[in-house]
């Protein structure tokens, strides 16, 4: 299947977008873990029982990671014209198939289906983006959205 230059550019930019966003979420998870450990140590020094903080760092990491993903994949693009932070840096934008602004529901559907698109370390989504006519992953197809290059 031959790609034109614009389609190839979108595919590569989408791959980089996911790498950047994954890196940002990893940094947020590490920082939240450090915060959780420091908070636990502080509370233990203030007299809280040590046993009650054996799970705290992990809970903080999971909670912050989930909130970070929801913020980056749903709320941020919904409030900022269809682009996640990495998409803004790479000149990409999520739109409906007709070119309009996606609804909050559309972003939620895209995010839910990231569980399928992310299978095999993201290979499922990457292959779909590469082989579909509109360069859509499954989440885009179900939500009726497409990622376009912003000029």
Image (cartoon, helix red, strand yellow):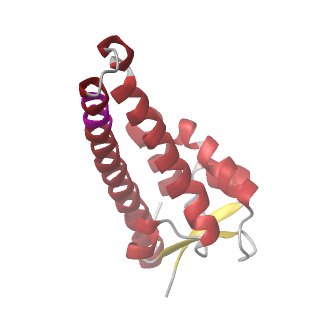
Q: Is residue 71 magenta?
A: no
Give the residue displayed 33% in from the left and 17% down from the top: 54
Looking at the rendered structure, the number of numbered marks drawn on it comes to 0
Give the residue displayed 62% in from the left and 42% down from the top: 113
Which of the pair 50/113 is nearer the observer?
50
Q: Is residue 127 above or below residue 77?
A: above
Question: Could you tell whether 58 is left or right of 75 in the image?
Answer: left
Percent x, y of residue 75: 60, 59
Q: In this view, does 28 lie above or below 42?
A: below
- Furthest-top residue in this view: 51
Give the residue displayed 63% in from the left and 51% down from the top: 110
Res. 146 in view: yes
- Report the predominant secondary structure element of the magenta stretch: helix
Res. 118 in view: no
Percent x, y of residue 49: 33, 14
Percent x, y of residue 81: 61, 76
Give the magenta range: 36-41
Percent x, y of residue 124: 49, 40
- Furthest-front residue in this view: 47
Give the residue displayed 53% in from the left and 55% down from the top: 71
Which of the pair 66/129 is nearer the observer?
66
Residue 82, picture quadrant = bottom right
Q: Is residue 39 magenta?
A: yes
- Furthest-bottom residue in this view: 151
Which of the pair 79/23 is nearer the observer?
79
């Amino acid at each position: 299947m031959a790609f034109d230059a614009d389609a190839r550019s979108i595919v590569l930019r989408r791959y980089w977008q996911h790498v950047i966003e994954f890196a940002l979420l990893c940094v947020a998870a590490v920082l939240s873990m450090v915060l959780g450990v420091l908070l636990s140590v502080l509370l233990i020094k203030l007299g809280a029982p040590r046993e009650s903080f054996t799970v705290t760092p992990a809970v903080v990491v999971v909670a912050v990671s989930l909130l970070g993903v929801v913020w980056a994949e749903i709320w941020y693009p919904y409030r900022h014209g269809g682009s996640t932070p990495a998409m803004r840096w790479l000149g990409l934008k999520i739109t409906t198939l007709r070119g309009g602004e996606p609804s909050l529901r559309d972003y939620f559907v895209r995010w839910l289906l990231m569980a399928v698109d992310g299978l095999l370390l993201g290979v499922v989504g990457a292959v779909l983006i590469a082989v579909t006519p509109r360069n859509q992953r499954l989440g885009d197809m179900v939500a009726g959205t497409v990622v376009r290059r912003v000029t």
